[in-house]
Amino acid sequence: MNCVIVDDEELPRKVLIELIRQRPDLNLLEVFESSVEALKYINTQEDIDLIFLDIIMPGFDGIDFIRALKYKPQVIVISSSQYFALKVFEYENIANYLLKPVNKEKFKKAIQKAEKRKEQSVGTLKPATSKEAVPAKESILYINSGKRLIKIDIPSIRIIEAKGNFIYIKTINENYITHSTLKNIEDKLPADKFLRVHRSYIINLEMIVDIQDNSVLIDKEIIPISRRNKPQLMNRLNLL
């Protein structure tokens, strides 16, 4: 099985590398200290069978990482705490949960389980279900504003913000207000261009200037990114 290690701690990485090297059925492709760098790599590969993942990572932790995977290889979670065990098994591609330090016997059993799951075609690579599969919508949107019916060029929309029973549509040239819900307008936008990053915000992905921590910069406006929506945003970006 082709595998990857994602762990920011040096000693656990070395232990895993050595355990993998002792098994001819495992082929170690890459080792990453950064979960973000690992995600960039893994989401461009379709031949990865297994990820050894430290669940407690700085910046972009293991739970967010699992949710952001474009494909779904099996994951063996490695952690110094049992705290996340129940949480991670909510995801069907989790093969096992090992506590640090990982010993040879527990590692062997985890690999045997992963191999059995692979043989049964459980946890094999498959694209994550997302809105990317939704056909593109029309390029024009009409909204009611006062007594006017206004035509908006969808590609010109930068940000859509919900405030109470109204939404604010901010385009490159003008801003508009209409009585609606974020969910209603979200359904009318092309899913490959727009993404809801917060309960109150939809952004045009092509308008992103910068992303830092839990916020995204659109033109000169800082938009918050919710923890729930951040993995999907990371999945949608064309990362280098």
Image (cartoon, rainbow, N blue to C red):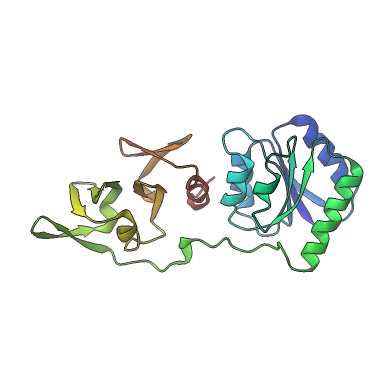
* 23 sits to left or right of 96: right
Quadrant location of the N terminus in the rendered image: bottom right
x, y percent for residue 29: 75, 48
In this view, which residue lies farthest toward the top?
A: 10
Write the residue at 88% across / 40% down: 103
Pick the front one: 203 or 228: 228
Which quadrant holds residue 143?
A: bottom left
Q: Quadrant of the C terminus?
A: top right
Which percent across, then down, holds residue 201?
35, 46
Total marks shown come to 0
**Residue at 73 percent of width and 65 percent of height:** 122
* Residue 30 occupies quadrant: top right
Q: Residue at x 71, y 61 (%)?
A: 123
Relative depth, front residue between 80 and 218: 80
Determine whether, in the image, residue 222 is placed left or right of residue 225: left
Relative to 206, 69 lies left or right: right
* Vertical comparison of 180 with 210: above or below: below
Image location of residue 34, percent across then percent down: 64, 37
Of residue 235 and residue 200, the one placed in the foreground of this image is 200
Locate residue 53 relative to residue 179 in the image: left or right.
Answer: right
Q: Residue at x 67, y 62 (%)?
A: 125
User: Picture coordinates of residue 223 (x, y %)?
Assistant: 36, 39
Work out which residue is located at the far left of the displayed protein and give it: 147
